[in-house]
Amino acid sequence: MNTNKICIRCGMPFPPREHTGRIPFETRYCEPCVKIRVEERTKEGFDSESIVEKRTIARKRYFVGIRPNSTRAVFYMAVVEPTKEMCPQYNAVIGPFRTKRGAEFMRDHGANNPHVQTVQDAERIAKQIADENAIENQTLYVASCWWRDNDAFCTVAGNSARLVEKTIFKAMRNAAIDEYNNSDSEDKRRVRDYMDDLAWSGVNAFAFDAIVPERIIRQYEESYSTHADTVAHHPDMDYSDYEMLRDGRKDVVVYL
């Protein structure tokens, strides 16, 4: 039976392997993508001998750019302040915002709004809205798929049940196509026949803290709530993934 996992970077199946503890993402990426990701993280400042050596990462600094036609867009920069030469497409720039949700609130509700005059106003109101979406009140949609009589090789979570379902179906089809491509020439089965050998859980709703482990919540939630400038990295989940789930974004899924 095939027990391959799906690489969260390229979407291709790969054989499962043991976690050495040195590279936190090695069990979720295929071998070529692990090498690419190690190179990327080494360039980001991680020690090449110990990818988890660096303990903190700088948070993105968000800005709202106002175009000549008065439309607004959110963008981010790592360290430097935006200048006219760097952002010629904008007539004016508002920021920096400490959170993306604050910048998005300013983008969507800041124009001609007497209640949103400053960055602090946008951050405060956006946080009030976010507080209503506290962990104990937040729901995640989760789905898994597997080859029959085997463990799940792909599990995804998100804030949109429709997107989670679409993503898991894509993973199942990719797995079936891979099996078809690797089958013997005498094998007359088609992709749809391999699909019949797959099963999935359906999309199920869970409380946020029932899906995201307590150790991850404990490490990230304080930084998320206080808008800290740096975030201690947890090897089991990137902060960006945690933030997207906590923000309630419906256009993304996270592979677990």
Image (cartoon, helix red, strand yellow):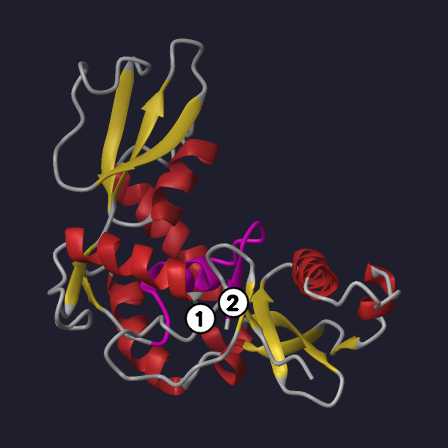
Query: Quarter of the image containing the N terminus?
Result: bottom right
Is label 2 in contact with label 1 (beta carbons under 8 Å)?
A: yes
First of labels 2, 1 by sequence position: 1
Local crowd size for mark 1, using a 10 Å CA cut-off: few (<14), some (14–19), many (≥20): many
Kindly state the secondary structure of the residue where label 1 is placed. Answer: loop
- Measured as percent of width and height from the top left, residue 66 is found at 35, 20
Picture quadrant where residue 128 is located = bottom left
Left/right of residue 197 with respect to residue 124 in the rendered view = right
Type of amino acid at the residue the image marks with label 2: Tyr
- Measured as percent of width and height from the top left, residue 204 is found at 70, 76
Between disc 2 and disc 1, the foreground one is 1
- The span picked out in magenta is 236-255
- Measured as percent of width and height from the top left, residue 139 is found at 59, 72
- Measured as percent of width and height from the top left, residue 226 is found at 24, 64
Residue drawn at the location 50% of the way across and 73% of the way down: 256
Q: Determine which residue is flagged by label 1.
A: 28
Residue drawn at the location 60% of the way across and 77% of the way down: 153
Q: Determine which residue is flagged by label 2.
A: 255
Q: Which mark is drawn over residue 75?
A: none
Left/right of residue 180 with respect to residue 15 in the rendered view = right
